[in-house]
Amino acid sequence: MPELPDVEAYRRRLQAHGLNKTIGKVAVTDKRILDHVSPAAFARTLEGRRLTTAKRHGKHLLAKLDKGGWLTVHFGMTGDLQFHQDPEPAPPYTCVRLDFPGGAHLSYINRRKLGRVGLADDFESFIVHEQLGPDALDRSFDVAALKKALGGTKRGIKAALMDQSVLAGIGNIFADEILFQARIDPRKPVPRLDAARLERLHAATRRVLQEAVRRGAGSETFLERLPSSWLLPQRRKGGQCPRGHGALKTFTQGARTGYYCPTCQH
DNA sequence: TTAAGTGTTGCTCT
DNA sequence: AAGAGCAACACTTA
């Protein structure tokens, strides 16, 4: 599930419920999710520590440890982070669980194991090491930064938008919404985007991601809470253009399906 | 039933 | 050397 707005929701939950509690036992129940660290080393690093702040860059969530270093979390397609107050059986597909005093615990769950949990020394070095572009919601990400990020690529704009080394945070779903709102054809080569389109693309990127966060991305009722002018609720077989141009079209690029309106996106 | 599909990323091949 | 395609994974849907 998680793209930038969903990860931001996780960040806020972690910030609200997971900070400044001493971590007791750390249980790694599926070590395949650990990123270049053994279960023993991972547990040893976290046990007895407290998380002091939660930050996000693109789709990555990082929590700072009180004695230095960071816990890193990536969700892949099926990752989830759940807090529970009471001792209870771990949800299926739990990979890592941190116990807090009084029975509260934090579970990282991932069905398809396409995410990673790990450790990093430093926030900025982690971003560099992961080759992440600027965060799409960072305050400094203006039109000039967008142009710079897109650089000299000749790819289609949707592929470029989803490339985390170009711009961090956007995946298949929100790329479709952003390009619909900016009225740009997802396959349009980046060099053929004029100034007006770049301006619209930048504005739509920020507006869509901010609105998604505000309207509770990641919650079950997210789609129902979106305005009828959005593409997402129609993003399915038989979906209609919210601007009244009839059926949406689909296209495939690299095993991902995209939805767009051929009438209003150019 | 079998096969294709999936909100991600990373590796391989061109 | 940038960019396309598929593998990884474990399910769900057609």
Image (cartoon, coloured by chain):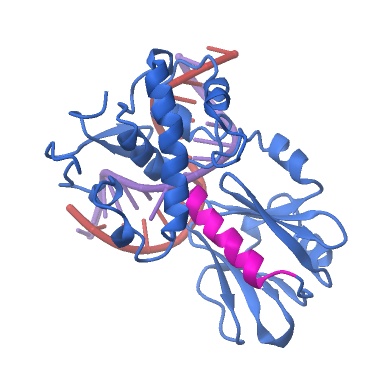
Chain colours: A blue, B purple, C red
**Residue A157 inside the magenta-drawn segment:** no
The residue located at (42%, 50%) in the rendering is A211
Residue A262: quarter of image: top left
Give A237 or B12, whichever is nearer the viewer.
Answer: A237
Residue A183 place in picture, x, y as percent: 30, 30
Against A154, residue A67 (above or below) is: below
* A230 relative position to A150: left or right: left
The picture places residue A23, in percent across and down from the top left corner, at 77, 74
Please state, as top left, top right, bottom left or bottom right, where the C terminus of chain A lies in the image. top left
Let me know if residue A15 is in the magenta part.
Answer: yes
Residue ID at (30%, 33%): A252
A193 to the left or right of A244: right
Residue stretch rendered in magenta on the structure: A2-19
**Residue at x 80% of width, y 61% of height:** A65
Question: Where, by quadrant of the figure, is residue A258 drawn?
Answer: top left
Q: Residue at x 62, y 53 (%)?
A: A116
With C5 as the anchor, is A234 left or right in this view? left
Q: Is A109 displayed left or right of A185 in the figure? A: right
Q: Is residue A69 visible?
A: yes
- Say if residue A1 shows up in the picture: no
For the stretch drawn in magenta, what is the main secondary structure? helix
